[in-house]
Image (tube, helix red, strand yellow):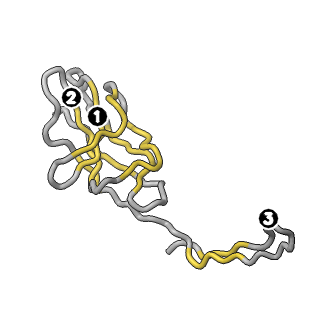
């Protein structure tokens, strides 16, 4: 089978509806017919948006840039392509986008000079 396996992605972007982090997969064992890999964000209706360009055989990771819009897509898919056709049913990974907003942000300015700030900033860690 000319399909990658073990697709994984850890979202390191802390903003809601934005992604960023390392996508990994196990490359095709016999890639003699593979001309390249392509990584897409995919939804349940098979709409998709390519992330990055095309990657040569042997590639097994992609650094998804921070601030990449999730755009309603639920999955990350890694397609293989031969000189004849692109894979129609690639393996996917279910994206988990969990924003991390601090809570209870507080600052009291103790600096008496105009246009200057001084004091402690406090917050609670994200849940």
Q: Indicate the position of residue 6 as horizontal and vertical percent values.
A: 30, 46
**SS under mark 2:** strand
Image quadrant occupied by the N terminus: top left
Q: Which residue is mark 3?
A: 115
Q: Which residue is mark 2?
A: 81
> What is the number of the mark on residue 65?
none
Badge 2: few (under 14), some or many (20 or more) residues near its Cα, within 10 Å?
some
Badge 3: few (under 14), some or many (20 or more) residues near its Cα, within 10 Å?
few
Which numbered disc, 1 or 2, marks the residue that appears first in the sequence?
1
State how far apart marks 3 and 2 are (Cα): 59 Å
**Looking at the image, do the residues carrying marks 1 and 2 touch, with CB atoms under 8 Å apart?**
yes
- Relative vertical location of residue 15 with respect to residue 46 in this rendering, above or below: below
Which numbered disc, 3 or 1, marks the residue that appears first in the sequence?
1
- Relative vertical location of residue 113 with respect to residue 13 in this rendering, above or below: below
State how far apart marks 1 and 2 are (Cα): 8 Å
For the point 70% across and 75% down, which residue is it? 107
Q: Which residue is mark 1?
A: 38
Q: Which sits in the foreground, 87 or 118? A: 118
Q: Indicate the position of residue 59 as horizontal and vertical percent values.
A: 36, 30
Query: Quadrant of the rendered structure where residue 58 is?
Result: top left
**SS under mark 1:** strand
């Amino acid at each position: 089978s000319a399909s990658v396996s073990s697709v994984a992605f850890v979202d390191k972007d802390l903003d809601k509806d934005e992604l960023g982090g390392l996508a990994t997969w196990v490359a095709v064992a016999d890639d003699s017919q593979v001309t390249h890999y392509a990584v897409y964000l995919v939804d349940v209706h098979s709409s998709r948006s390519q992330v990055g360009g095309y990657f040569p055989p042997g590639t097994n990771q992609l650094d998804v840039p921070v601030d990449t819009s999730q755009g309603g897509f639920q999955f990350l898919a890694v397609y293989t392509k031969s000189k004849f056709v692109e894979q129609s049913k690639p393996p996917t990974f279910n994206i988990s986008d969990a924003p991390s907003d601090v809570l209870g942000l507080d600052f009291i300015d103790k600096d008496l000079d105009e246009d200057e700030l001084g004091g402690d900033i406090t917050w609670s860690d994200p849940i």
